Image (spheres, rainbow, N blue to C red):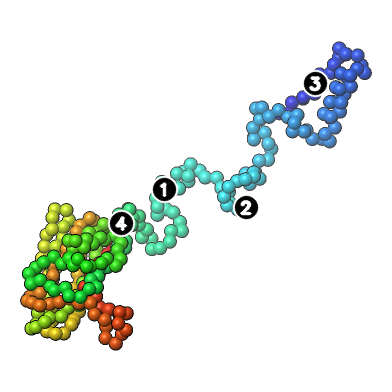
Amino acid sequence: MAVNTLPPPPINDKPGSYTWLEWYRQLRAYVSTSGSVPWYIINFSGSSITDIAVRNHEDLQSMQGGTSGEHYHLTAAQHAALSAGPHNNMSGIQGGTAGQYYHLNADQYAAISNELAVDLRTSGTVLPTTPTVFAPAAAIVVNTSGIAYNTGNGQFTFTNGGVYTMSLTLNASASAGNRKVYFYAELDTGGGFNILRYSARSREIVPSVEDQLLFTATLKIPKGAKTRHYIWASANTVTLNSTDVPGTTAGTVTLPAFRVQWTGSL
């Protein structure tokens, strides 16, 4: 691999001439390397790393990743398995037991946790006496993730499919006589709203006694579906009010006139 870069002797010149003196100088530089060959006189053309007798991988420099002793070669099969191998063939997968490692698609991942809370914090809302979609204009969305509420039409829209639980409370009082408050829901899965027949609920309140009426339900709702609630009273007059809890400082602990909470996941 080493190439002699010393020029041929100037045999056509007289001994002792400048050309001979220069050739002697180059010869002296060439042979005075103390048993080693300077890099500058080596021609690397046609060379290969296999020309080196010992070529340990770990002796190479600037190998990215890992620490001493942690630089590994992979076979073609091992490399392919990094991106295309069976998930359960991997080691160190946290959680579950054998056969309990699952993949989620984007929709399923988004549906892991969804919630919505809507409050009516004003007073004086009178319930109708015929089935009516409940959509108080003063309702406010307290928090939301994956569920939207339209204050204009009282509709709830579910971005993700899953099993959802609804909790609806009314802080109500009747002006006279026992009254019943009724509830049912409709669901629209894409073809228009349909009554959920067995979603009906009823609660009774006594006159001049403010009470909290609780309606709950759990149901499976498809992705993109909408629901709305019908609420009405058996007779006049049932009023919803926001009131402070007795014994507390005014404006610090308050029962909202209306609150609905939705929570759901896969």
CB under 8 Å between callouts 2 and 3?
no
- Can the viewer see residue 44? yes
Left or right of 164? Residue 16 is: right
Residue 111, image quadrant: bottom left
Q: Which of marks 2 and 3 is nearer the N terminus?
A: 3
Tell me the CA gap for discs 2 and 3: 47 Å
Q: Which-is-in-front pick, marks 1 and 4?
A: 4
- Of labels 4 and 3, earlier in sequence is 3
Report x, y in % for residue 229.
Answer: 16, 66
- The secondary structure type at the circle numbered 4 is helix
The residue under label 2 is 68
Q: Which of marks 1 and 2 is nearer the N terminus?
A: 2
Sequence order check, earlier mark of 1 and 4: 1
Q: Name the residue under label 1.
A: 85
**The image quarter in which residue 227 lies:** bottom left
What is the x, y in percent for residue 247?
29, 87
